[in-house]
Image (cartoon, coloured by chain):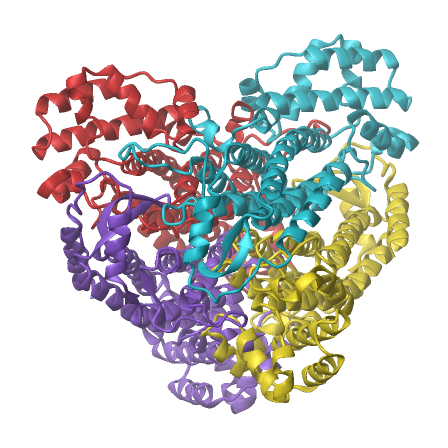
Chain colours: A cyan, B red, C purple, D yellow
Amino acid sequence: MTELFDPLYAAGPVAAATDAAAWLRAMLDVEAALARAEARAGLIPAGAADAITEACDTLAVDPAAIGERAVASATPVVPLVAALRDRLPSEFHDHVHAGATSQDIVDSAMGLVAARALDALDATLGTVSQSLARLAREHRDTPQIGRTLLQHAAPTTFGRVAAGWLVGVDEARALLRHVRRERLAVQCGGAVGTLAAYGNRGTDLVALLADELGLAAPTIPWHTTRGRIGELAAALGVTAGALATVAGDVALLAASDIGEVAEGSPGGSSAMPHKRNPARAVLVTACATQVPGLVATVLAAAPQELQRAAGHWQAEWPVVGTLLRLVGSAATHADAMLAGLRVDAARMGRNLDAADIPPGGGTGSAGHLVDLALAAHEEAA
Amino acid sequence: MTELFDPLYAAGPVAAATDAAAWLRAMLDVEAALARAEARAGLIPAGAADAITEACDTLAVDPAAIGERAVASATPVVPLVAALRDRLPSEFHDHVHAGATSQDIVDSAMGLVAARALDALDATLGTVSQSLARLAREHRDTPQIGRTLLQHAAPTTFGRVAAGWLVGVDEARALLRHVRRERLAVQCGGAVGTLAAYGNRGTDLVALLADELGLAAPTIPWHTTRGRIGELAAALGVTAGALATVAGDVALLAASDIGEVAEGSPGGSSAMPHKRNPARAVLVTACATQVPGLVATVLAAAPQELQRAAGHWQAEWPVVGTLLRLVGSAATHADAMLAGLRVDAARMGRNLDAADIPPGGGTGSAGHLVDLALAAHEEAA
Amino acid sequence: MTELFDPLYAAGPVAAATDAAAWLRAMLDVEAALARAEARAGLIPAGAADAITEACDTLAVDPAAIGERAVASATPVVPLVAALRDRLPSEFHDHVHAGATSQDIVDSAMGLVAARALDALDATLGTVSQSLARLAREHRDTPQIGRTLLQHAAPTTFGRVAAGWLVGVDEARALLRHVRRERLAVQCGGAVGTLAAYGNRGTDLVALLADELGLAAPTIPWHTTRGRIGELAAALGVTAGALATVAGDVALLAASDIGEVAEGSPGGSSAMPHKRNPARAVLVTACATQVPGLVATVLAAAPQELQRAAGHWQAEWPVVGTLLRLVGSAATHADAMLAGLRVDAARMGRNLDAADIPPGGGTGSAGHLVDLALAAHEEAA
Amino acid sequence: MTELFDPLYAAGPVAAATDAAAWLRAMLDVEAALARAEARAGLIPAGAADAITEACDTLAVDPAAIGERAVASATPVVPLVAALRDRLPSEFHDHVHAGATSQDIVDSAMGLVAARALDALDATLGTVSQSLARLAREHRDTPQIGRTLLQHAAPTTFGRVAAGWLVGVDEARALLRHVRRERLAVQCGGAVGTLAAYGNRGTDLVALLADELGLAAPTIPWHTTRGRIGELAAALGVTAGALATVAGDVALLAASDIGEVAEGSPGGSSAMPHKRNPARAVLVTACATQVPGLVATVLAAAPQELQRAAGHWQAEWPVVGTLLRLVGSAATHADAMLAGLRVDAARMGRNLDAADIPPGGGTGSAGHLVDLALAAHEEAA
C-alpha cells in the first residue's frame, strides 16, 4: 500500500533514507568499508579493497531479486554477496565479505540507514523546533485560559504553552542526537562474534570499520546484545510522544468550540465543504499512534539467543525502518502544521474573559518560563 | 523497503490483497456498490448507478497521485471522489458518493480489503493445517522425549506434539472465519452517522450496501465504535501466536543439539556453508514477533472521539494492512516450513533412550489425543 | 502500592475475584475437583476424593508463605500440594494431585479466576449498559451538534451518540460472554500432555473435570496452545476500548468550552476549588489506557516452547489478573460516571444554534438508529 | 494477588521502594521539601516549614483510606493534603501545599519513588554484573561450540559468551544511572504551570525544591511534557531485555539436550521429582516478558492534553511502579541464577568435539574480547 499511503505515513525525507535502495546502498557501503578497513589492517591487499569499493559503488542490483533470494537463507546478505562476487574477477572473490557474517553486514547497514535517517529527521525537527520557538516568542504574553482535565483552570499564556511543546521537542531531539552519536555502532564479529578470521587484527579492524562508516565502535561485538537498538527505538518513541503532544493540543485548540488556533491550510471534507479540519495535526497523531507498539516489538525482540537469534533479530529490520519513517513523517506533518499555524489571540482573550474562574489570577512567571525555554533552545542549537 | 523485504515479511497472496491497488479497488468497489444500493433504495436513478459502476470498474488512478492529494484532507477519499466525478458526465456528479462521508468509504473498503485478505489467508492456513494433520497422523505413534522448561520430562509422541500445533492453527482459523463472517461490516452513516441524506431509506440502504459488498450489516453506523477492528486485529494476533508456536518448536527441535526435525530446504550462511539453518521457521517467527505490538496499537486507537476521530481512526489503516500481511506471510513461510519437514524418528528414539528420566513411562493417551485433534480438524474442514 | 491505588485502578468486585485469596481458592477448588473427577472415573477411591475435597475446602494457607516457597520451583503448586498433603492422612497423599502437573492446576485455576471475574464484570457492564440505554432513550430526540475531527459538522442527537456508546459496550459484553462460555477451559494433561497416568480414562477425566468446574473441555490439553488466553485478553482489550470511548467523549463534552454534560459528583482540585473535574471519566481512561500493552504481552507470550514454556507461560498469570482488574475497574468507574451524568440539553441547543454550519441539516435517522440500538440491547439482555 | 505472586514478580528490594507506604512517604517528603524550599525562598515563614516537615515526617496515614478518598478527585493528593492540614495548627494550613497543584506533588513523588527504586536496582544489578564478570574471567578460555539460529556454527568460549551478557547489563545499568541523575526531576509549576502563586520567586523555588529532594531541576514545568517518564520506562525496558537475554541463554544452555550449565538450586516439579528446572531463569524471563508492553503504555500515554491530561497522566503511576518492580524482580532472580551457576566445562568440550563443523576453527579473539569487556566493566564501576 506504499504509494497510496506513504504521503500520509511516510512523508518527508526519512522515507527515502529507509527504502529498499537505501538498505541495499547501506549494505554495499558496509561491504566496501569492510574491505577498506581490512586493507588498512593488512588483512587483504589494497588493490582488492579498491576493486571491491568500486564494485560496491557501481553495482546495480534489483531489490526484488535480492529479496526473493533472501528467503532461502533468511538474510539478504547471502544473495548480495553472491552478486558482488559475480561482478568481480575471481582473484578478489575471497576478499569480498572476508571473515564476516551476514549479521555484521545487516547490523552495520541498519546503523547506517538509521544514521542517515536520523540526520534527515534532525533537520526536520530543527524547523519544527524553530516554529515552536517563534510561537513561544511571539505569544510570550498572549493570555489564554489554562485547561486542566479540559476544565478552565487559571490563566496562562499561549507562549508558555508553546514553550512546553518546544522543550519537549528539543529534549527529544537531544536524545536522538545522543543515540546517533553514541549508540549507532558498527557490527563486526564474524560467525560467532570472536573475530576468528582476523588473527590478532580483529579488534583493530572493528575500530577501522567504525572510522570508515562514521559509526561508533562497540566494546565488543553485539550480535545478541541488543540494547543499542532498544535505545534507538525508545528515542523515536519519545520523539513521537513529543510531536503528538503538540498535535493533540493543536487539534483541541482548533476545535470549533475553542477556536484559538487553526492550521494554515485546513483540510476539506468529502461531505461537508464548510469543514476546517486540522488535517496535519490528524496526520501527526495518526503516525505517532503507531509508534509505541513498535517500540514494544523491538524491546520484546531483545532477548536474542546464544550467538545469533532465530527470528527476533530478523524482526528488527522492518520495525526499525517503520519507526524511522513514522517519526520522520510525524515531524514532517508537524512542520507543515506549525509553519502556517494561525493564532487567534482575540479569541483567546474572549475565551479567557468568559471563563468561570476566580478573578485576579495572573499569568505568574509564564513569560520568564518562555525565556528559559528559549534560552535552552538557543543553547542546544 | 518493500521490494527488498517483502519476500520476507509480506510473502504469499495476502500481500497483493492489501497493496495500494487493492485499497483503491476496494474504495472504488464501495463507491460503485453504494450507487447501486442507492438505486435499489430509490435514492438515485438506476442509470446513475450503472454509469458510476462502469466508471468505478474502469477508472485507472495513480495511487501516488491520490496519496499526495490525500494529505490536504487526511483522507484519500476526497481526491478519489474528485477523480471519479471527473470521469463522469456532470449529470451524475451529485450521484457519486451521495450522502456519504469519507469514513463510510474507507471503513467499508477496509472491510473489503480485510475480507479478501482473510480469504487468501484462510487458504494458506488450510494447507498449513493439512500438513500438520499429516504429521500428526504419520507420527501418531513415533516416540519422542517430552521437554518441559527445556528439561527432559517424560515420553510423548511426535504426533501428539503435532496435534497440539494443529489444534492451535485450526482454532485460530475458526476465529478468523468468525471475524470474516460476522465482524467485517459495511460502514454507512453519512457525515455524523445519522444517515441524514437518505430520508427514511437510510437503514434500508445500509442493508442493501452490505448485500452488495458481501459484508455484515452493523446494528447502527460504527464510526467511533471500533470493537470490530479490535476483534479483527486480535484474531490475527492469536493466529500469529499459533504459527509462531509451531515455528519456535521446529527451530528448537532442529537445533543441532536435538536434531529431531529439519526443514526440507534449510538455509545456507554467508560465512558457514555447512550450516542447515531453519530459515522458514526463522521467518515465521520474524513475522509473528511484529504482530502483538500492532494489535496493541489498534486497541489503543479504539477510543475515538465524538463523531469522527482526529488521528486514532487514521492510524488504523496502515496497521490493519500490515497485520494482515505479516500473518499472511507467517502462514506462507509456515506452509513452506512444514511441506518439506523432515522428521528423524530414529534420532527421536535415540534422544528418548538417552534421556535421564524414570523408567517405565509410557505415552499414555497420546495416540487417542491425536485422533481427537484429527477428528476436530475433519469436522472444521 | 495496592492499598493506595487499588480504589483507582482496581475498583469494583473484580478485584476481590482476582486477589491472592481468590487464586489460592481456585487452585484448591481445582485440586478438589480433580480428585472428585478422578473418583468418578474410577481412578481413586471415592473416600479419597471426599477427604481431599474437605481438606481443600477448609485448608487455610498463608499466601505469602506459598509465594515464598513458589520461587524454588517457579510455581505455587509445588508448595500448595505439599501443604495439602500435610493436612491429610498419609493414605491419601498419593491421591492428591494424582497424575497432574503444576500447569494443569494453574491453568484450570486461571480459568476459574477468570470465569468468576468475568461474571462480576458482566454484572457491572450490565448496569453500565442500562445507563447508556436510558440516556439513549431519554435523549432520543435531543439535538446536539455533531463533531468530526473536533470540528462542528452537522446535527445529531445526544441519544444517537449514547446509542453508539451502547452498541460498543453491548458488543464487548457479548464477546466476553462468548469467551467465558467457550474459551475458558480446564487444563488436564499430566506431565507432558499425554494423560499418561490415567490409563484409558484420561480423556473421560478431562470431561469430568470440566463438568466439576463449570469450564469448557478442550479438544486436547493445551499446555502450549495459548490461543484461549489470547482470546480472553483480546476480549478485555476490546471492552476497555468500548469503555474508554464513552469516557473520552464524556470528558470532552464536559469540557468547560463545550459544557454539554457533567458528572454527577465532579472532582475537586487541590489548588482550584472551583474546578468540576470529570474524575470518573479520568479514571476510566486511566484504567483503559493500561490495557492494550498488556494484551500485547499476552499475545507476545503465546509462542510457548515444546511441552511447557520456560518463562512465557509464567508471565501470563499476573498479566491476566491485572487485565481483569483494570477492565473491572474501568467498568466500575464508568458505572459511577454514567449513573449520575447530567445532560444539559439547553446547552446542547445553544451550541448547535451557534455552530457555523450550513442551514437546514436535520438529524436524519438518528431516532430510528436509537430504536435499533435499544432493540439489540433488549435482545441481548 | 500481591502476597502470593510478589515473590515471583516483585522479588528484591525494589518492591518495598515502590509500595503504597513508599508512595505516601514520597508524597509527604515532597510536601515537606516544598515547605522548606518555600521558606528558603522567603515565601512562607521558616517556622511553618519546620512544623510542616515535622508533621510530614510523623504523619501516619492509612493508604487504603487515602486511596478511597482519592477517587472523588482522581488524585491522592487532595485527601493527603487534607490529612496533613488536620494535623497542623490552623495558622499553618495555608502554608501547606502553598501554590502547588496535585501534579506537582505526584510527579515529584514519582521521581522520588523512582530514584529510590533505581538506587536499589543499581545495587542488585551491580552484583549481577559482578557475577557475569567472574564468569567471563574464569571461563575466558573455556571452549564452547557457538550456535547461530540454534545450529552449531563455530567455536567460541564461554567467557566470550558471558562477556556479551556483561556488556549488555553494564550498558543498561549506565543508561539507568543517566536517567536517575539527569531525567528524574522535580515538578513545580502550580495550577497551570506558570508558578503563578510565587511572585518572582517561582523559578528559584524550583531549583530549591530540586536541591531539597536530590532530583534534577527541569528547564520549565513539565506537566504535559512527558519525555522524562518515557526515558525512564525505556531504560527499564532495555534493562529487562539485557537480563532476559542472559536468562534465555541460561535456560537453553541448561536444556537436557545441551547441559552446559545448571542453576545452583534447580527447581523441582510437582509431577517429576527428577526434573532440574532452571527456575530462576524462568522467573527472569517471566518478569522481563511483561515489560515491553508496559513501556508501550507509558509512551502511548505521552500525548497529554493542554495543562493537565484527563487520563493519560493518571495511567502512568501504576505502570511506572510495576515497571520498576518487574525489572527489580528480574534482576533479583538473575542474581540468584548467576550466583550459583554451575558451568560444565567438560560437557562444553564434549559438545564442541561432537559438533559437525569444519575442522580447524579457533576461538579467534575471544579472550581479548573478554579482556575488553572486563576493562569496560572496571571503568564503569
Residue D170 located left or right of residue B139: right
* Quadrant (top left/top right/bottom left/bottom right) for the C terminus of chain D: bottom right
Image-based side of D127 in relation to C237, left or right: right
Res A223 quadrant in image: top right
Image coordinates of residue B155 in percent, x first then y, are: 54, 59
Residue D37 picture location, percent across and down: 74, 71
Q: Which picture quadrant has residue C348?
A: bottom left
**Does residue C191 appear anywhere in the picture?**
no
Residue shown at 46% from the left, 37% from the top: A283
Looking at the image, is D161 positioned above or below residue D69?
above
* Nearest to the observer: residue A315 or residue A235: A235
Quarter of the image holding residue C116?
A: bottom left
Extreme-front residue of the structure: A360
Residue at image point 17% right, 26% down: B95
Furthest residue to the left?
B42
| Percent position of residue C120, x then y | 35, 73
In the rendered image, the vertical position of residue A356 relative to residue D270, given as above or below: above
Vertical placement of residue C18 versus B177, above or below: below
Q: Total of numbered circles in the picture? A: 0
Task: Please give the name of the residue rendered at 53% of the width and 51% of the height, measured from the top-left corner.
Answer: A143
Q: Is residue A240 left or right of residue A41?
A: left
Q: What is the residue that sits farthest to the top in this orientation?
A: A89
Residue D103 visible in rendering:
yes
**Observer-nearest of D373 and C70:** D373
Q: Nearer the viewer, residue C264 or C80?
A: C264
Q: Position of residue A208 (x, y in %)?
A: 86, 28
Q: Residue at x 30, y 19 (%)?
A: B83
